[in-house]
Image: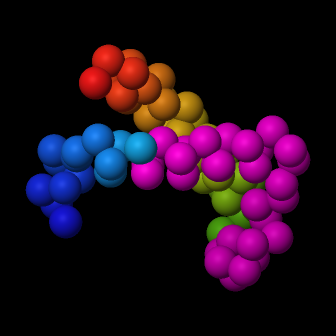
């Protein structure tokens, strides 16, 4: 598992790129991540602002992943 993530092949990168694209699409259409069951249970122990910040960082990581790895997929 670690070797796949440390040295991903093209099929792994395409799969992760699809997941990152879906995450960005959900943000664009206005999906409320606070209504997810795991997030709802997390809101019991932490403030809502921290959970929103957590999901915002996920969006930033997805955009960063696409910016970093899309050129590699396009050139191969």
Q: Quadrant of residue 35?
A: bottom right
Residue at 35 percent of width and 43 percent of height: 13
Is 13 positioned to the left or the right of 43 in the image? left
Closest to the observer, 53 or 68: 68
- The correct choice, above or below, for 48 with respect to 12 in the image is below
- Spot the residue most to the left: 3
Is 45 positioned to the left or the right of 9 in the image? right
On the rendered image, what quadrant is the C terminus found in? top left
- The correct choice, above or below, for 65 with respect to 72 in the image is below
Q: Main secondary structure of the magenta part?
A: helix
Residue 11 in magenta stretch: no
| Magenta residues, start to end | 15-44
Residue 12 visible, this orientation: yes
Residue at 75 percent of width and 72 percent of height: 36
Residue at 67 percent of width and 59 percent of height: 51
Q: Quadrant of residue 37?
A: bottom right
Closest to the observer, 61 or 46: 61
Is 68 positioned to the left or the right of 41 in the image? left
């Amino acid at each position: 598992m670690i070797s796949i993530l440390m040295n991903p092949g093209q099929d792994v990168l395409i799969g992760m790129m699809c997941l990152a694209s879906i995450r960005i699409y959900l943000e664009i259409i206005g999906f409320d991540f606070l209504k997810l069951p795991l997030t709802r249970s997390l809101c019991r122990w932490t403030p809502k602002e921290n959970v929103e910040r957590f999901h915002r960082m996920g969006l930033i990581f997805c955009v960063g992943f696409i910016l970093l790895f899309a050129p590699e997929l396009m050139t191969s």
